[in-house]
Amino acid sequence: MVNAERFIRETIDGIRTGAGDHRVVIALSGGVDSSVCAALAAKAIGKRLIPIYVDTGLMRKGETERIARMFRDLDLRIVYAQEEFISALSGIVDPEQKRKAIGERFIRVFEREAEKSGARYLLQGTIYPDRIESEGGIKSHHNVGGLPLHMEFEKIIEPLRDLYKDEVRDVAGALGLPPEIQHRMPFPGPGLAVRVIGEVTREKLDVVREANAIVEEELVDRFLPWQCFAALLGLGTGVKDGNRVHGWIISVRAVNSQDGMTACPLDIPFVVLGHLASRITDEIPSVARVVYDITPKPPATIEYE
Ligand code: XMP
């Protein structure tokens, strides 16, 4: 386990040295990794840090408003790029291609924003499991393997590259970040795109976003899972108002884990699952079926793609 106080001291020095006189952009997602990175960098280089949040259209419900509120003390730039991301995903069904398309878009957006502010360096909240999963060829995390080869940045700084998630949370606590950030569930860089099987469309994103909000509302405070969410699996038949319909199938996933490398499904009472199924099918008319995923990791992964 890392010594948080020492890590903070050394990392602030490291960022200061690494950045020199340069301006540095950081992709702030509101998750614990990028928030810790931003807090360390703000201490190290002050106003030379340029935090950017990209509204990709692949984020959770209310996320952009939440982040604008949470980081109002930093000079946060919000880039509205929904159209750009969703068009880039059009027609892509292969999970790896999706991740690459998203990674590519992220970098292009950051290059543009960096150019506007004269920044040549990029700071990223990549953590150790992101790197080993990418290097091991399991998948490309958008902030690692998805990077296009010809990037315009001179340097990428990754201060958390050797930490596990629970260590990042300790550092967040030691930095005095709010518990809302410190204990936030992990959310994948490619966002809801990896929770929609097959092609990503606006309609599917809206459905999975709404279902996800219900899952979080019902499960987070009550069961304190390491991670819980909704995924959209595809279309199936159902009966609504006495008519046979085609409707979306939503899978609910809730797991406990130490570091995301292995995970086990939560033993949620049937009555709670039944209530979830009713809420999701009632509140989202285009959903016909809700299933609960009982597979551990391995053999399944936590996310669906
Ligand atoms: P899997 O699906 O591989 O996920 O069992 C393990 C943990 O990593 C998160 N995850 C990601 N995080 N970029 C990220 O920043 C990604 O591309 C990505 N894919 C998965 C996932 O949510 C889980 O916590």
Image: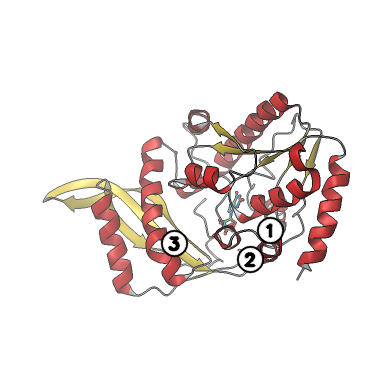
Distance from label 3 to label 1 (Cα)? 20 Å
Residue 241 percent location from the top left of the image: 13, 50
Q: Which amino acid does label 2 sit on?
A: Asp
Task: Say which amino acid is labelled 1.
Answer: Pro
One can see residue 219 in this view:
yes
Query: Which image quadrant for residue 75?
Result: top right
Mark seen at residue 129: 1
Disc 1: residue Cβ within 8 A of ligand 1's nearest atom = yes
Total marks placed: 3
Residue drawn 33% across the image and 52% down it: 249
Q: Mark 3 points at which residue?
A: 253
What residue is disc 2 on?
259
- Element class at badge 3: strand
Q: Which of 96 and 273 is in front in this view?
A: 273
Residue furthest to the left in view is 242
Q: Which of marks 2 and 3 is nearer the N terminus?
A: 3
Judged from the image, the quadrant occupied by ligand 1 is: bottom right
Q: From the viewer's perspective, is 90 left or right of 49?
A: left
> Could you tell me which secondary element the residue under label 2 belongs to?
loop
**Direction front: furthest residue:** 73
How many neighbours does mark 3 have within 10 angstroms: few (below 14), some (14-19), or many (20 or more)?
A: many
Q: Position of residue 256 (x, y in %)?
A: 53, 70
The reply to whether discs 1 and 2 touch (Cβ–Cβ < 8 Å) is: yes
Of mark 3 and mark 1, the one earlier in the sequence is 1
